[in-house]
Image: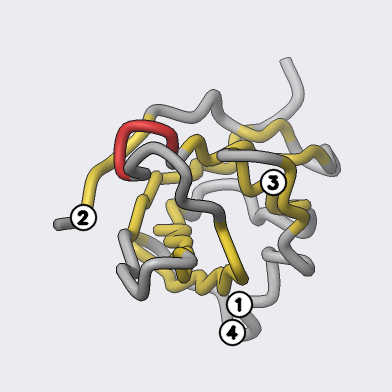
Amino acid sequence: MASRILTEPFVAGEDRDVPFDFKAQMPVGVTISSAVATAVVYSGTDAVVSIAGTPAISGSIVSIPVSGVDVGVIYELSVAATLSDGQIPVISTLIAGVPNA
């Protein structure tokens, strides 16, 4: 079952990590073995969707470095975490690019 988290918009030129917490999907004693992030354009136009970097795992949290978000574009960023018991829960978020104030 996929779930969704809220993420603050990215200001033009901003780079930051987006944390995905899988604690609620992990039974006691289960760990995250690996994680994969994918990004697609949800709304707007971006010829090269390459906003997500390599996932970093720390306990129940998978952090994805995000950069290159275009102003006026909304992206859907999804993370699939492979758990040590074989389950693969997915969490996604929408990321909006906004201009500098």
Q: In the rendered image, which residue does mark 1 sit on?
A: 49
Are the residues tagged 2 and 4 within 8 Å (C-beta)? no
Q: CA distance from mark 2 to mark 3?
A: 17 Å
Secondary-structure class at tag 1 = loop
Residue 16: % across, % down? 80, 38
Q: CA distance from mark 4 to mark 3?
A: 25 Å
Q: CA distance from mark 1 to mark 4?
A: 6 Å
Q: Would residue 52 appear left or right of 85 to someone viewing this image?
A: right
Q: Nearer the viewer, mark 1 or mark 4?
A: 1
Residue shown at 49% from the left, 54% from the top: 73
Name the amino acid type tagged 2.
Ala
Q: In the rendered image, which residue does mark 4 sit on?
A: 47
Residue 35: % across, % down? 58, 68
Q: In the rendered image, which residue does mark 2 sit on?
A: 2
Q: CA distance from mark 2 to mark 4?
A: 27 Å
Name the amino acid type tagged 4.
Ala
The mark nearer the N terminus, 2 or 4, is 2
Which numbered disc covers residue 63? 3
Residue shown at 72% from the left, 15% from the top: 101
Residue shown at 72% from the left, 52% from the top: 57
How many C-alpha atoms fall within 10 Å of the one at disc 4: few (<14), some, or many (≥20)? few
How many C-alpha atoms fall within 10 Å of the one at disc 3: few (<14), some, or many (≥20)? many
The mark nearer the N terminus, 4 or 3, is 4
Secondary-structure class at tag 2 = strand
* Residue nearer the viewer, 75 or 65: 65
Residue 38: % across, % down? 51, 73
